[in-house]
Amino acid sequence: NVAADSFVDTKYKHEDLVLEKSHWHMQFKDATAAAKAAAESAEKASIAARAAAELSSLEKMSRQNSTESRKSGR
C-alpha cells in the first residue's frame, strides 16, 4: 500500500503542526494555477485520509486477533 507507506511516521509534536504565518501566504500566477494547487492539495488529503482509514482498520483487526488469541489460550 503506497499511501500507508508514505505516511509511516504518525508521531507529531504540536510545534511541528503549527506553521508560521508566512507559510500560509501563497501567490499564484492566475486562477488556474490556484485551482490546480487546490486540486493537488485535495488529492493529497484524500490519499492521507484513505491511509489513515486503512491503518485504523488494520489496528482494529490486530487488536481483535490479540484478544481472540488470549481468549483461546494461545
Image: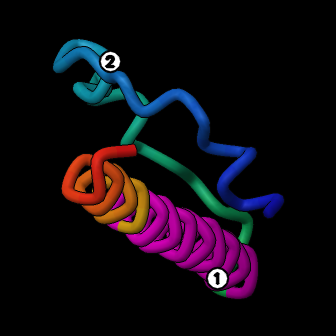
Residue position for label 1: 39
Which mark identifies residue 54? none
For this orientation, the residue located farthest to the front is 73
Residue under the point 60% across and 36% down: 8
Residue under the point 69% across and 73% down: 40
Crowd around label 1: few <14 · some 14–19 · many ≥20 (10 Å)? few
Image quarter hosting the C terminus: top left
Crowd around label 2: few <14 · some 14–19 · many ≥20 (10 Å)? few
Given residues 69 and 51, the one toward you in this image is: 69
Which label sits in the foreground, 1 or 2?
Answer: 2
Residue position for label 2: 16
Residue 2, x across and y down, in percent: 82, 59
Specify the amino acid type for callout 2: Asp
Left or right, 70 with respect to 45, comes to: left
Mark 1 or 2, nearer chain start: 2
Give the residues in magenta: 32-60
Residue 22, x across and y down, in percent: 37, 27
Specify the amino acid type for callout 1: Ala
Please tell me whether mark 1 sits on a helix, a strand or a loop: helix
